[in-house]
């Protein structure tokens, strides 16, 4: 992509796509903007580029950032829309559904933390909470020095 002054930086191109989602109504006032990890996975960009996307959107006055919580559409002070369920529970639910459908097979490794972070656009602490919840509810077992695995169906929870 070129303009009169030369090539348009990649972070500006990605910011344009996110801006289009905002102006098109796919992202509404108070919604969370896709995380850096989500932008990295979706657009195949580096973490620094993803960070610059949020900076560019703030410069344009489209979003604001709340330290420790994320970047949200609209000016500071607007009510933030929160998901009806915690993010780690939503990811856990998706993984359980994938186990039940056979996408994640018994006696096979579950995705690692870094894979979960990339696939779902979540933080490392959230990925750890997801895996801990799967272990606690018996949807996963840990094999020492090997990883976290899908258990045999006979060991799955009944509820």
Image (cartoon, rainbow, N blue to C red):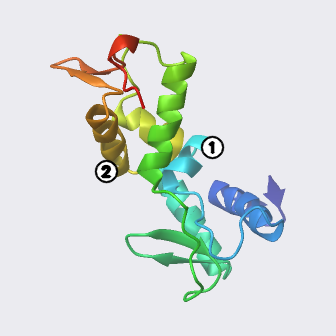
Side of 115 where 64 appears, left or right: right
**Distance in Å between CA atoms under marks 2 and 1:** 21 Å
Looking at the image, which residue is at 58% across and 66% down? 32
**Residue at (79%, 63%) from the top-left corner?**
20
Image-quadrant location for residue 56: bottom right
Tell which of 129 and 26 is nearer to you. 129
Please name which of the two marks, 2 or 1, marks the residue nearer to the observer.
2
Q: Secondary structure at mark 2?
A: helix
- Single out the residue that lies furthest toward the bottom: 77
| Residue marked by disc 2 | 125
Counting other residues with Cα less than 10 Å from the Cα at mark 1, is it few (<14), some (14-19), or many (20 or more)?
Answer: few
Q: Which residue is mark 1?
A: 42
Which secondary structure, mark 1?
Answer: helix
Given residues 124 and 141, the one toward you in this image is: 141
Decide: is 96 above or below 104: below
- The tag on residue 135 is none
Tell me if I can see residue 152 in this picture.
no
Determine whether 46 is above or below 103 in the image.
below
Q: Is residue 2 visible?
A: yes
Q: Position of residue 60 (x, y in %)?
A: 68, 79
- Mark sitting earlier along the chain (2/1): 1
**Residue 14: image x %, image y %?**
68, 56
Image x and y of residue 112, in percent: 36, 30
């Amino acid at each position: 992509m070129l303009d009169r002054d030369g090539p348009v930086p990649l972070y500006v191109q990605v910011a344009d796509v996110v801006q289009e989602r905002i102006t098109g109504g796919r992202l509404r006032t108070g919604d969370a903007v896709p995380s850096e990890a989500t932008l990295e996975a979706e657009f195949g960009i580096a973490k620094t580029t993803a960070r610059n996307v949020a900076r560019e959107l703030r410069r344009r006055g489209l979003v604001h950032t709340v330290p420790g919580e994320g970047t949200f559409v609209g000016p500071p002070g607007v009510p933030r829309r929160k998901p009806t369920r915690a993010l780690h529970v939503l990811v856990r639910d998706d993984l359980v559904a994938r186990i039940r459908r056979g996408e994640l097979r018994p006696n096979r490794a579950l995705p690692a933390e870094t894979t979960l972070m990339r696939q779902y656009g979540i933080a490392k602490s959230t990925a750890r909470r997801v895996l801990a919840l799967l272990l606690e509810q018996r949807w996963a077992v840990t094999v020492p020095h090997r990883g976290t695995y899908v258990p045999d169906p006979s060991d799955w929870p009944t509820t």
